[in-house]
Image (spheres, rainbow, N blue to C red):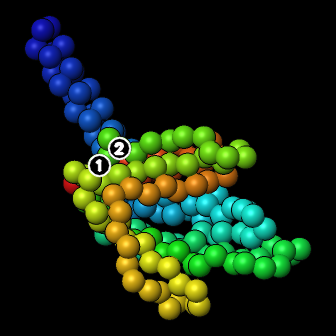
Amino acid sequence: MQKLVAAASIFLFSLSATIAQTQAPTLQQALNQLQNTLSSHGSRASAGYIRRFEPREFRDCKISYELVPQLGPDHQGYIPDTQRVTFQLTDLDPSRVTLFAGKSGTYSVGFRTLDQKQAIETRYARESHTFGEAYFSNSQTLTVTNKSAAEDVKMNLTQAIKLCQ
């Protein structure tokens, strides 16, 4: 009887481990979900213009995106530069991905590099795709339109970082 119970326990443990493995997202699934959430909830209005989130690369432990400003229908005047952000997930610290409430109902997910390494590249362009000199930092934020989207971004970004390490 004890052998039967032990065999059943081993089988159940093996089965639950297999189920957990099949339910855990792959790197590309986590990156796809992150890209979809940011594409749907990463654009926002600010000071008379809209910063539209445009994904560029979400694969192989690399993320690159642009925040492209557009004038609102009733706004004239200054338009900020397009901002391109690029980083390797291997440079990020999964324990330093944070969620916090922002201004006017938005939420932000912040992330930092391992050992404060200056590895997050940001470039700016006044005209379409004429990006200037690269600036490097050790942190960045992704702003989204609601808390649920921010929680999804935090979860998928953290998962993708862990899968890349």
Q: Quadrant of residue 102?
A: top right
> Which disc is residue 46 wearing?
none
> Element at badge 1?
loop
Which quarter shows the C terminus? Answer: bottom left
Image location of residue 63, percent across then percent down? 40, 68
Amino acid type of the residue tagged 1 in the rendering: Asp
Image location of residue 145, percent across then percent down? 67, 52
* Horizontal relation, residue 139 to residue 68: left or right: left
Tag 1 and tag 2, C-beta contact below 8 Å:
yes
For image coordinates 15% across by 21% down, the residue present is 7
Query: Which residue occupies the extreme left position in the image?
Result: 3
Image location of residue 115, percent across then percent down? 22, 51
Q: Is residue 164 visible?
A: no
Q: Nearer the viewer, residue 111 or 18?
A: 111
Q: Quadrant of residue 26?
A: bottom left
Q: CA distance from mark 1 to mark 2?
A: 5 Å
Q: Nearer the viewer, residue 58 or 48?
A: 48
Question: Which residue position is annotated with label 2?
Answer: 96
Label 1: few (<14), some (14–19) or many (≥20) C-alpha neighbours in 10 Å: some
Question: Which residue position is annotated with label 1?
Answer: 93
